[in-house]
């Protein structure tokens, strides 16, 4: 019998944790990835106990160039077949672009971008041999939004990830689908970890959604093989408006609703 698993990066908190819980509830065996071993251990025990699935974990720092190979080698050596790959781990840099070191920018780009490509490159070959697979890339509404003075590279790399995910549709003929899930403001540890909790606190509550809801809608979309998913009606409307309203008007409204993001540097 195939030893089939879903692998989730950034599984110790926020959206990744809720995606892991959601997949476990649906009966998927799981491989959890993040840096913090203790949390991974506790979460894997929770999921095994609650949902009677198989679950293992691997502690890995995705800022390291060697991380994707090490993750792949771990799953291969344990004979875990990865049929579902969820690229979710992420954070953003708190300072203005000119204040961040190139080393920090590169580390962040590795987590949000290069590691996603490297993991997908590794597992897609196995998916082709196995006759199919599901890929999710947790992107962001920032992929569609006007440039922000905060986190200058965050929006651009999420746009890149959307385009990358879209380009994987050429693998549909092998039974492989890729879904870019693009959440708006979600209540997680992201804003604290990225040094922008103050800005997040000033965002009106109707724009803030729960990680559980984002995870449910994202997993549903991935299982249906949708190319792009913007979870929640509120954020679907905002993304629609982003496509029809001039960017200057949108930046003005966003500056009022979410102050700090469009300030002068
Ligand atoms: N929250 C939002 O408003 C929002 C909106 C749109 C998109 N997103 C996207 O959603 C994804 C998940 O973010 P979240 O909001 O759930 O944030 P979160 O609660 O801070 O969770 C981030 C996860 O990524 C892991 N992680 C961070 N750096 C890592 C590294 N160097 N190596 C390996 N794992 C790492 C963290 O685990 P460890 O610390 O244990 O390593 C944690 O499990 C990100 O891609 C983010 O860009 C978030």
Image (tube, grey):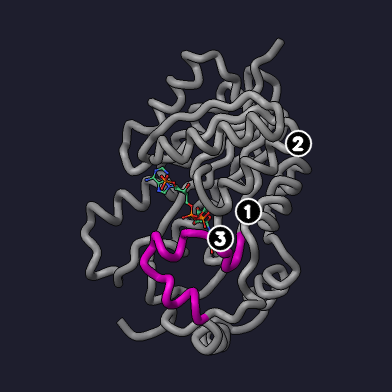
Magenta part of the protein: which range? 183-202
Residue 233, x across and y down, in percent: 75, 69
Instruction: Determine which of the numbered discs, if any, sits on residue 250 in the image.
Output: none
The answer to whether 70 appears left or right of 143 in the picture is left
Mark 1 vs 3: CB contact within 8 A:
no
Q: Nearer the viewer, residue 5 or 42?
A: 42
The residue that appears at 47% across and 41% down in the rendered structure is: 116
Of all residues, the one furthest to the right in this rendering is 224
Residue shown at 63% from the left, 29% from the top: 48
Measured Cα–Cα span from mark 2 to mark 3:
24 Å
Q: CA gap, disc 1 to disc 3?
A: 7 Å
Outermost residue on the top side: it is 1
Quickly name the residue at label 3.
Answer: 140
Mark 3, residues whose alpha carbon is within 10 Å: few (<14), some, or many (≥20)? Answer: many
**Of callouts 1 and 3, the N-terminal one:** 3
Q: Mark 3: is the Cβ under 8 angstroms from ligand 1?
A: yes
Q: Are marks 2 and 1 in contact (CB under 8 Å)?
A: no
- Is residue 210 placed above or below 18 in the rendered structure? below
Q: Of helix, strand and loop, which one carries label 3? A: loop
- Is ligand 1 less than 8 Å from the beta carbon at label 2? no
**Quadrant assignment, res 198:** bottom left
Label 1 sits on residue = 181
Q: Residues within 10 Å of mark 2 (few under 14, many from 20)?
A: few
Residue labelled with disc 2:
26
Q: Earlier in the sequence, mark 2 or mark 3?
A: 2
Q: Quadrant of residue 129?
A: top right
* Residue 50 horizontal/vertical position (percent): 69, 35
Figure disc tally = 3
């Amino acid at each position: 019998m195939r030893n089939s698993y879903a692998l989730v990066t950034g599984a110790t908190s926020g959206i990744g944790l809720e995606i892991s819980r959601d997949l476990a509830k649906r009966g998927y065996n799981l491989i959890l990835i993040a840096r913090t071993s203790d949390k991974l251990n506790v979460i894997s025990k929770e999921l095994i106990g609650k949902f009677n699935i198989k679950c293992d974990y691997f502690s890995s720092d995705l800022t390291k160039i060697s991380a994707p190979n090490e993750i792949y080698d771990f799953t291969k050596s344990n004979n875990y077949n990865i049929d579902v790959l969820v690229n979710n781990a992420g954070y953003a840099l708190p300072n203005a672009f000119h204040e961040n070191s190139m080393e920090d920018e590169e580390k962040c780009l590795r987590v949000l971008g290069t590691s996603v490509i490297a993991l997908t490159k590794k597992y897609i070959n196995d998916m082709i041999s196995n006759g199919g697979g599901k890929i999710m890339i947790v992107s962001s509404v920032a992929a569609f939004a006007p440039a922000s003075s905060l986190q200058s590279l965050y929006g651009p790399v999420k746009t890149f990830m959307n385009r990358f995910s879209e380009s994987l549709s050429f693998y549909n003929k092998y039974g492989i689908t890729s879904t870019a899930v693009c959440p708006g403001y979600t209540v997680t540890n992201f804003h604290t970890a990225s040094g922008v909790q103050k800005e997040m606190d000033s965002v009106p509550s109707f724009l803030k959604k729960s990680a559980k809801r984002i995870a449910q809608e994202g997993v549903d979309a991935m299982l249906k093989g949708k190319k792009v998913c913007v979870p929640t009606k509120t954020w679907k409307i905002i993304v629609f408006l982003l496509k029809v309203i001039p960017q200057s008007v949108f930046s003005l409204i966003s500056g009022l609703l979410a102050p700090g993001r469009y300030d002068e540097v």
